[in-house]
Image (cartoon, grey):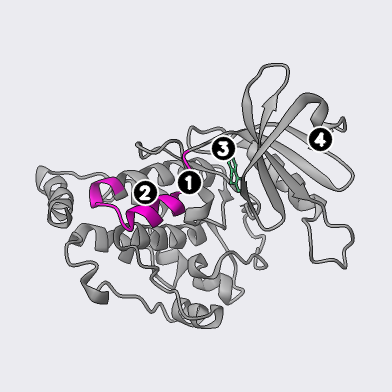
Amino acid sequence: AMFRTESVEEFYQIGEDIGSGQFSEVKKVTEKSTGKDYAGKFIRKRRSTASRRGVKREDIVREVSILEELSHDNIISLHDAFELQKEVVLILELVTGGELFHYLAEEDHVNEEVAAQFVKKILEALKHMHDRNICHLDLKPENIMLLNRNTQNIMLIDFGLSRRIKPGEDIRDIMGTAEFVAPEIINFEPLSLNTDMWAIGVITYILLSGLSPFLGDDQQETYENVTAINYSFEDDDFFSSTSELAKDFIDHLLLKDPRKRATVDQCLSHPWIMPRSKKQKVQRQTSHLKLE
Ligand SMILES: Nc1cc2c(nn1)-c1ccccc1CC2
């Protein structure tokens, strides 16, 4: 059986809230037998097929089976799982560095050296997934946690929309967060591993500028900006000190045709992520010096 049916409170002491999702609360929990701290993700089950609240049991089972298949330093690990009458509780590895989103809110934007290190870590986690034909489909700063404040070590945390991409099988029904969704999601065209690569382009743009490239005044306007690929680096000279390498990296990801986008392997060997020469490394650093 996938889930234990004993009471989670018999084995874990429930602590304070540390986060939440649309249908989930995440609390710090302590395993009684070991004294170890974890993150307990309490996911409300959907009571009936007619309801729009809660998560379908099959979707929770999918999230758990994907978490069980993945094993990587920058991907949250699953320690245990309980099923109660109204909810499922996932016992996840505890990360306490806060969301990348909050770090960005404080820092506004980060210098290129730091941004490139963050993106490299996210790409390494994503490579572990893509090598297993698993796509995340909800990559955004809220789903990226910092291991701790002062390193670029990150952790992907939420696999609620993740899917195994089977050749020939069409996935069209996923809808993530408007600012980060690729054009094919809005147009209900087939999704693929390349759908994640679009989100990497959006996250990189935000890391470097603090601006969200497609964000409009409402969801409709955001969708129009995405499907029109309406972004630029000219906004209010937020990119005046950004290197050409960084802009080139983003330009190879924010492409309408998913097949033209750089893959995770191509991103990992892009000179912005893997500088091949002193000149390229200096180019990345000088942009930082100008900012400071
Ligand atoms: N939707 C969310 C949201 C969160 C988490 N998981 N899913 C999480 C996982 C491990 C440690 C800490 C958290 C808090 C945020």
Amino acid carrying label 1: it is Leu
* Label 3, residues with CA under 10 Å away: few <14, some 14-19, many ≥20: many
| Viewer-nearest of discs 1 and 4 | 4
Residue type at tag 4: Phe
Which residue is at 56% across, 37% downward?
Answer: 76
Distance in Å between CA atoms under marks 2 and 4: 34 Å
- Disc 4/disc 3 C-alpha distance (Å): 18 Å
Q: Is residue 193 above or below residue 213?
A: above
How far apart are the two marked residues, 1 and 3, measured between alpha carbons? 12 Å
Does 174 sit left or right of 75 as displayed?
Answer: right
Can you give x and y, in whole percent of width and height, for residue 29 in the image? 67, 32
Q: Of the residues shown, which amino acid type is indicated by label 3?
A: Ile
Q: Give the class, few, some or many, for how many residues have Cα within 10 Å of label 4's Cα (few <14, many ≥20).
A: some
Q: Position of residue 84 (x, y in %)?
A: 86, 40
Q: Which mark is residue 119?
A: 2
Res. 234 in view: no
Cβ–Cβ under 8 Å for marks 4 and 3 = no
Residue with the mark numbered 3: 76
Q: Nearer the viewer, residue 14 or 85?
A: 14
- Kindly state the secondary structure of the residue where label 4 is placed: loop
Residue 245 in picture, x, y percent from top left: 21, 58
The CA distance from mark 1 to mark 4 is: 27 Å
- Of the numbered discs 4 and 3, the one sitting upstream in the chain is 4
Disc assigned to residue 126: 1
- The answer, for residue 255, to whether it is visible in the render is yes
* Mark 3–mark 2 distance (CA, rounded to whole Å): 17 Å
Label located before the other in sequence (3 or 2): 3
Q: Quadrant of residue 189?
A: bottom right
The segment highlighted magenta reads 97-114
Mark 1–mark 2 distance (CA, rounded to whole Å): 10 Å
The residue that label 4 is drawn on is 3
